[in-house]
Image: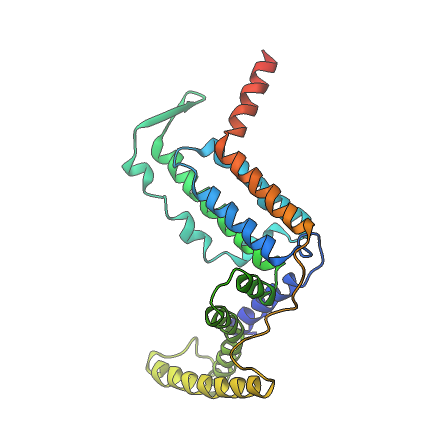
């Protein structure tokens, strides 16, 4: 199995995860989409030194992992190429912000270290929430939810077809890579001199495949408006999920819940 086959397998694994059956999977896609957007907005809105208040936001992805039955390791495996980039965002903060901010066990911690950890956690939480949305919602349901928000049909259709065509492109790349290695056994990778012809062949094959796909869509009655998914009802349970969790996110933003709990526990111990 070459790298293209492994990439295609991972792409299909996301569709398998989205086809699961759990309390989160059964929620309406619009409720999950809006809740995820609210979570990301609230998470990003925390200040760079509000690390203690930000920590409470970990409960949302932890709850979704538990309810959906999706292993946490799957999330980190899928995001293994994106997470290092997100983590690298605040690496230079300790060099630019050296002013002492707090003392922990006799150790002075600078504001740069706190802001670095805060930025890393923000990226981790937002990526986890986005992954959970995609892993519990099919692309058809997600596009249907975007249409209910009155996004332009052409943009939603473009998003859906791009997502679907990634798999087709990966299949073409896999076939061409296998054919190349059969003609050049024992060679690692593709020679630089062959990149031009390889990409040209990929472009031609992609254009031919796109024409075939468009023709098959027209034969099935495609006229510019795509039937993204079955129109499911937005029930009271979905509305309750959206309103309740949005309110919880806002409360977590307005009040430093970890700090309040810490003061209560400290006062109780005294």
Decide if residue 162 is on the left or right side of residue 268: left
Colour approach in the figure: rainbow
Toward the viewer: 37 or 261?
Answer: 37
Q: Is residue 158 visible?
A: yes
- The answer to whether 257 is drawn above or below residue 216 in the figure is above
Give the vertical position of 104 relative to 39 (above or below): above
Residue drawn at point x = 55 percent, y = 69 percent: 6
Q: Residue at 60% of width from left, 64% of height from top?
A: 141
Q: Residue 103 lies in what quarter of the image?
A: top left
| Labels in figure, total | 0
Give the quadrant of residue 226.
Answer: bottom right
Locate residue 227, reporting x and y percent. Answer: 59, 73
Q: Quadrant of the C terminus?
A: top right
What residue is shown at x 59% (from left), y 57% (from top)?
30
Residue 48 in the image, given as x and y percentages of width and height: 38, 37
Give 133 or 157, whichever is nearer the viewer: 157
Q: Name, please, the residue furthest toward the top.
A: 270
At x 60%, y 53%, the residue is 31
Q: Where's the N terminus, which quadrant?
A: bottom right
Q: Position of residue 260 (x, y in %)?
A: 54, 24
Residue 182 can be seen in this image: no
Residue 147: horizontal and vertical position, in percent? 54, 65
């Amino acid at each position: 199995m070459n790298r293209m086959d492994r990439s295609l397998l991972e792409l299909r694994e996301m569709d398998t995860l989205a086809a699961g059956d759990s309390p989160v999977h059964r929620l309406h896609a619009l409720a999950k989409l809006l809740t995820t957007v609210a979570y990301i907005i609230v998470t990003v809105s925390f200040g760079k030194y509000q690390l203690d208040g930000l920590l409470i936001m970990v409960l949302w992805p932890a709850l979704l992992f538990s309810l959906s039955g999706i292993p946490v390791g799957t999330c980190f495996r899928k995001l293994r190429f994106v997470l290092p980039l997100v983590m690298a965002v605040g690496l230079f903060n300790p060099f630019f912000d050296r002013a002492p901010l707090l003392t922990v066990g006799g150790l002075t911690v600078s504001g740069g270290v706190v802001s670095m950890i805060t930025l890393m956690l923000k990226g981790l939480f937002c990526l986890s929430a986005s992954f959970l949305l995609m892993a519990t919602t099919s692309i058809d349901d997600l596009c249907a939810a975007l249409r209910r928000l009155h996004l332009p049909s052409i943009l939603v259709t473009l998003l859906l077809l791009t997502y679907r065509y990634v798999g087709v492109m990966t299949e073409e790349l896999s076939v061409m890579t296998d054919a190349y290695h059969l003609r050049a056994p024992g060679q690692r990778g593709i020679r630089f001199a062959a990149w031009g012809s390889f990409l040209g062949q990929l472009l031609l094959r992609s254009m031919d495949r796109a024409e075939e796909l468009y023709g098959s869509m027209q034969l099935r009655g495609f006229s510019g408006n795509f039937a993204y998914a079955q129109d499911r009802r937005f029930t009271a349970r979905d509305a309750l999920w959206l309103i309740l969790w949005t309110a919880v996110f806002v409360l977590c933003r307005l009040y430093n819940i970890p700090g309040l709990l810490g003061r209560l526990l400290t006062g109780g111990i005294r």
